[in-house]
Amino acid sequence: MCASYGLDPRFDGSDFIDTADEELLAGLRDWAEQNANETLRPTGKNLRNLNPIVTAVDDSLSLGLGWWGYLVDGEPAKFPSINTRSEHLQQRPASMPTRAIVPATNWFEMRKPERKWYSFDTGGLDLFGMAAVTQRGRATDGRLFTCYSIVMQPAVDHLFEIHDRMPLLIPSRFAREWLTSTDPAPILMQAALQAARPLAADINAHPAAR
């Protein structure tokens, strides 16, 4: 599962989302600079770290902050909610949940049994998008948040020996379709998995200092 990732403010956003405008990228870079060198983690009950997400609002793309994980009865869910299996979404009989794209420059996983951390990236500082599903959640103080769960798929062959799962990566040309499509869940998920293959093939893994 993906429980932490990075967003380097020096990112190259030229191939993040085809229709992302300069204002969106500038806002994302500003956030990354203010939070430089921070590892992005699930949102806590007390320390409410909110992380950047891209959503579709009135047919436009919007940069906002999301609560990583779901809220249930005002509290972080007691069941695993920071990740959602792609297989579960493929089995939905009807439409998909609302969706987001999570910007990142790398993510982290631990290789077992040696408990060694690895960083996964494109080999540089390319900005890429991780697929997420979202729902609204209300905290105990009454505040409403967009909660997100990163979609995980089986790892591609060259990464599998390090970790058996990886985020579903959304290439720039598929971003708007991921965010706005009204296709039934099985159809959209199959298209997303197919679109992700070239980007997933470019991901490298290397030991990370944690």
Image (cartoon, rainbow, N blue to C red):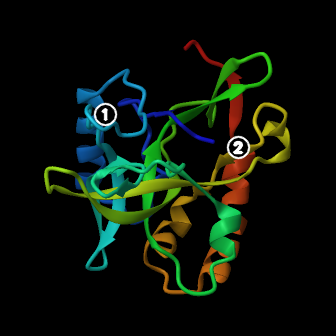
- Name the residue rendered at 50%, 33% in the picture: 4
Q: Is residue 189 left or right of residue 20?
A: right
Dot 1 and dot 2 residues touching (CB under 8 Å): no
On the rendered image, what quadrant is the N terminus found in?
top right
Residue type at mark 2?
A: Asp
Residue type at mark 1?
A: Ala
User: In terms of secondary structure, where does tag 2 sit?
Assistant: loop
Which of the two marks, 1 or 2, is nearer to us in this view? 1
On the rendered image, what quadrant is the C terminus found in?
top right
Res. 105 mark: none
Which residue occupies the foreground of this view, 68 or 180?
68
Q: Badge 2: how crowded within 10 Å, few (<14), some, or many (20+)?
A: few
- Name the residue rendered at 63%, 79% in the picture: 92
Q: Is residue 47 above or below residue 186?
A: above
The numbered mark, 1 or 2, whose residue comes first in the sequence reads 1
Q: Is residue 184 left or right of residue 37?
A: right
Q: Is residue 12 above or below residue 25?
A: above
Q: CA distance from mark 1 to mark 2?
A: 23 Å
Q: Position of residue 143 (x, y in %)?
A: 16, 55
Label 1: which residue? 32
Label 2: which residue? 202
Residue 8 falls in which quadrant of the image?
top left
Q: Position of residue 37 (x, y in %)?
A: 37, 21
Q: Position of residue 188 (x, y in %)?
A: 61, 78
User: In terms of secondary structure, where does tag 1 sit?
Assistant: helix
Q: Position of residue 147 (x, y in %)?
A: 36, 56
- Name the residue rendered at 60%, 80% in the picture: 185
